[in-house]
Amino acid sequence: MGGTPSRNFERAASGKIVVRGNAAIGESPPVRRLLIAAAIAFLGLLLFMPLALVFRYAFGEGLGAYLAAINEPDARAAIRLTLVAAVIAVPLNTVFGVAASWAITRFNFRGKNVLITLIDLPFAISPVIAGMIFVLLFGARGWLGPWLQEHDLRIIFAAPGIVLATMFVTFPFVARELIPLMQAQGSEEELSALTLGAGGWQIFWRVTLPNIKWGLIYGVILCNARAMGEFGAVSVVSGHIRGHTNTMPLHVEVLYNDYQFTAAFAVASLLAFVAVLTLVVKAAVERRVGSQDP
Amino acid sequence: MALALKRPGVLPGFGLSMGLTLLYMAFLVLIPLGGLVLFTGARMTLAQLWQTAVVDPRVVAAYRVSFGASLLAASLNAIGGLLVAWVLVRYDFPGKRVIDASVDLPFALPTAVSGIALTTLYAHTGWIGRWLEPLGIQVAYAWPGIVIALTLIGLPFVVRTVQPALASLDQEIEEAAASLGATRWQTFRQVILPAVLPSLLTGFAMAFARALGEFGSIYFIAGNMPYKTEIAPLLILIRLEQFDYVGATGIGVVMLVAAFVLLLLINLLQAWSRRYQD
């Protein structure tokens, strides 16, 4: 979707105003307290209670049961596959994100808006449709299905399909984080470096990268959280073969449908932990960026 | 020839970065998407598309659930999101930073995790569900559950689009309204709300679009009863599992068209709200 909320939020961070002590345009203290309470209740019902529940149920039968659930062979296989998918998808999407941002923010060319829209595509389409696209292409009755079968290659219902679906769903995240940042920074510093005789890679490593470091870190972390947690697209291409093509979210599903709630929430808590960590990194990055240029 | 050789800028690396970008996009997006278009074009007639994606009663029921619940969830997000954005921009209170940071949780939290958590929370034995059951309100495995899960998924959009609009609002206008005798509520309705409306609608449309495509959390909480609580993305998955590629593609094409229309609408809304903010 055009403009992720995180991009808009940068503007909020720079121009934030907090109205205090102006009776004419403020609300009375009771109204204030009521609104704050209502907002917290809204977030509490939707965010905090589900998050608390994940950890409460995960440790509901003690640490022993928790560790057993994570250590179980199918769970370990799922964790391994999730890590493999993330280790392939995140670096590739990072390189792509940096390259795309460099091309889009440092040069003028025709079709730039089309390119930006295409990068936004995975935001706009359902993850199930993303998975479907790969099934139509590589599935048993898809375009390349017969050819793949002849050569004994499996993509759908196998790890390559999962990696592909993960890459597709998460490829905008780094680019979307960097494009507004690099647009705001402009290319003056790079141009100065150029006039001082720096080469392309020198400019990138010594000027650009230090400037975009924090945005890049957040983009990579968010991309990683989404890669590990992707459910819809991976669900379509996986085939749910326990111990083979189950990622962590799919393993959570299998356990949950088996009424193994403690185990399901134990594996889910690992993913929830990654999510919380992502938000902590984001908050730290924003504070850093905020203190750099007030 | 001169045009082709004209460099798009003085910095180096255009060829490399552009080449890499296009290569990656081609492999990951253009070829698969082209495959979808070819598949639809080559293996489906218009009559088939009509039959599988427009008139099939189960599919129509799924659209109704998907669009209805998404619309309701986006509306809840518009109200709740405006409230949260207002409180975060205007007031100071303990724990504000944590609240602000947590708004992004739905971006980072896997939908399967929020799905099982919400289902457990609102099931009739759950922390919240047990209080609703005596009142005869069923949330999990029913329609309201879908709406709650979709509201969670779309939560960041309205908050993060309205926040900057509220922050950039000129306070003098509010002071002027107050000095002209407007009550606080009048000022809010007639001065503040119109000014943040473009951003609010942008966030609403984003939340709606995101809700339409959502699958993970709904899968757990909906109960997935055909004609009642079955959403369109789930029906695509069911068709694929039956190897009914034609049926799946039909629904997929309709949902894709809806997504693109929304994307267009969001871009227009963003252009409108930018005009307001500058």
Image (cartoon, rainbow, N blue to C red):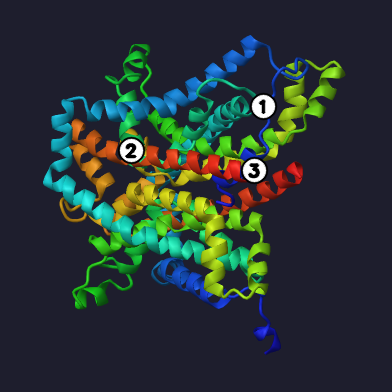
Cα gap from disc 3 to disc 2, whole angstroms? 28 Å
Which quarter of the figure is the C terminus of chain B placed in? top right
* Residue under pointer 3: A11
Q: Amino acid at mark 2?
A: Phe
Q: Amino acid at mark 3?
A: Arg
Disc 2 element: helix
Q: Percent from the top left, x then y, of residue A137?
A: 34, 68
User: Within 10 Å of the Cα at label 2, are there few (<14), some (14-19), or many (20+) other Cα atoms?
Assistant: some
Disc 3 element: helix
Asked whether the beta carbons under mark 3 and mark 2 sit within 8 Å of each other, the answer is no
Vertical position of residue B147 compared to residue A219: above or below = above
Side of A218 relative to A23 (left or right): left
Q: Return the mark for residue A273.
A: 2
Q: Percent from the top left, x then y, of residue A108?
A: 66, 70
Out of A71 and B231, give the one closest to the viewer.
A71
Cα gap from disc 1 to disc 2, whole angstroms? 32 Å
- Residue at position x 49%, y 54% from top? A216
Side of A50 relative to B26 (left or right): left
Q: Percent from the top left, x then y, of residue A168?
A: 40, 60
Question: Disc 1 sits on a residue from what chain?
Answer: A
Q: Are marks 1 and 3 on the same chain?
A: yes
Q: Are marks 3 and 2 on the same chain?
A: yes
The single residue placed furthest to the front in the displayed view is: A196
Out of B55 and A15, give the one closest to the viewer.
A15
Which quarter of the figure is the N terminus of chain B placed in? bottom right
Cα gap from disc 1 to disc 3, whole angstroms? 15 Å
- Residue at position x 22%, y 72% from top? A153
* Residue under pointer 1: A18
User: Within 10 Å of the Cα at label 3, are there few (<14), some (14-19), or many (20+) other Cα atoms?
Assistant: some
Out of A229 and B225, give the one closest to the viewer.
A229
Going from N to C along the chain, the mark reached first, 1 or 2, is 1
